[in-house]
Amino acid sequence: MPGEPEVLDDRSPVRLVAAIRQSVADGIVVEGGDLEPADRDLPLTEELSLGNVVPARRREFRAGRIYARQALQGLGASNSVIPVGHNRAPVWPTGVVGSISHTRSLCAVAIGWSADFLGIGIDIEEDSPLPCDLAELVSHAPELEHRKVIESRLGYDLPKLLFVIKEAFYKMYFPLNGRFLTFHDVRVELDVERRAAKVTIAPSSRLAAADNGCFEGRFGNSDGILFSVFDISAH
């Protein structure tokens, strides 16, 4: 009826992207949204690099590449083809680093210039709790100390948050040296007030001493979607 306020659609994709943008370092461009853009065609090189996958995976992939090109445009980079590499990660244009993440209905992309960042990792997941067996796979016992207190302050499942943080960290870390890490190779300390996470690589006979650094990322929750972002400055 005339004069009645307009009823807005669900704006969670907009709020998610805005929340991530507030969490990243200056110089990182974030784009994303729902999977509706996946109905558009992609360059043949990208489609062929994906291989034979189920329709849901192809839909995620298409949306991710379209948002990635929006991010490249925002960064001022060339509007390039972004195929899948041999390690299944995106092959970014020369001079660009970044990563892409999906849920069943949303996608987010974070990129920056390699002159500014050695690596960038992002992960988004629905904030539904992890089953007990997966929680044990993802977490060290010390990471779950004071779990009830932390969850009461955050309002969501701690093991699921640890999963998101470790996935984002891995997406940043792996392209730097191609070294595979398990969930138990890294340890997370949370600063709940700052929504910050400190990640250290646990001592291991598998990993070189040079790997035992300390890295800080950010995390948050927007409309039931957990997110985490990590970067390594090039300066």
Image (spheres, rainbow, N blue to C red):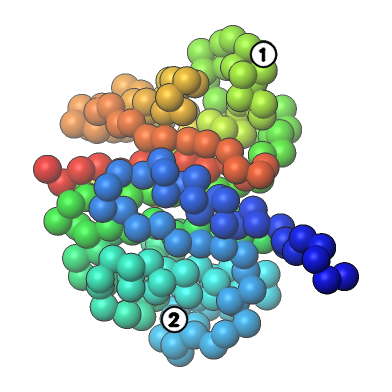
Q: From what the image shows, is residue 193 above or below residue 102?
A: above
Say which of marks 2 and 1 sits in front: 1
The front one of 61 and 132 is 61
Residue 180 in which image quadrant = top left
Give the quarter of the figure containing the N terminus: bottom right
Tag shown at residue 46: 2
Residue occupied by mark 1: 148
Camera sees residue 104: no
- Of residue 52 and residue 29, the one placed in the foreground of this image is 29
Residue 204: x percent and y percent?
Answer: 33, 25
Mark 2 to mark 1: distance in Å? 45 Å
Going by the image, does 119 lie left or right of 115?
right
Classify mark 2: residues with Cα within 10 Å, few (<14), some (14-19) or many (20+).
some
Work out whether residue 86 or residue 116 is closer to the camera in this orientation and state it. Answer: 116
Q: Residue 21: where, in percent of width, then height?
A: 42, 49
Apparent side of residue 87 relative to residue 47 in the rendered image (left or right): left
Residue located at (47% from left, 69% from top): 67
Looking at the image, residue 82 sits to the left or right of residue 40; the answer is left
Q: Earlier in the sequence, mark 2 or mark 1?
A: 2
In the structure shown, which secondary structural element does the residue marked by tag 1 occupy? helix
- The residue positioned 42% from the left and 28% from the top of the image is 196
The amino acid pointed to by label 2 is Glu
Position in image of residue 229 (x %, y %): 41, 43
Q: Residue at x 64, y 73 (%)?
A: 36
